Image (cartoon, helix red, strand yellow):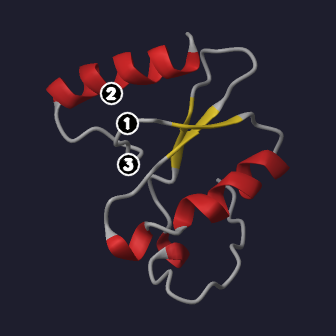
Amino acid sequence: MYVLPTPRIEGLQDLVFTANLGIVLIHLDPAPVVVSNFTSEPRRGEPEVGEPFFESMGYPVHFSPHRFEGRPTSSTSTTTSTSRLRAALGA
């Protein structure tokens, strides 16, 4: 496990507890990151922090054109989310 600091940004109250910022698709080569697009007001600014963070680690960064918050909410949404992400990435 790595603990990496994030910048302190006004209005991002949950940034210190960042979870579900994105997903690394390790089964693809190169392994891209799909960054979340949060609907919760306090988390909406986090993708702007996540993008340069993942890029600095060498990951190609993508944003889903669909609602994606880094994790599925049900098994049905898992299938739907996965299909949409694959289509968006051309995978």
29 is higher (above) or lower (below) than 36:
above
User: Residue 16: x, y in percent?
Assistant: 54, 77
At label 3, the amino acid type is: Glu
Residue linked to disc 3: 69
SS for callout 1:
loop
SS for callout 3:
loop
User: Residue 17: x, y in percent?
Assistant: 48, 72
39 is higher (above) or lower (below) than 75:
below
At label 2, the amino acid type is: Ser
Sequence-wise, the earlier of marks 3 and 2 is: 3
Give the Cα separation between the discs numbered 3 and 2.
10 Å
Closest to the camera, between mark 1 and mark 2, is 1
Circle count: 3
Give the Cα separation between the discs numbered 1 and 3.
10 Å
Give the Cα separation between the discs numbered 1 and 2.
8 Å
Q: Is residue 33 left or right of residue 86?
A: right
Residue linked to disc 1: 66
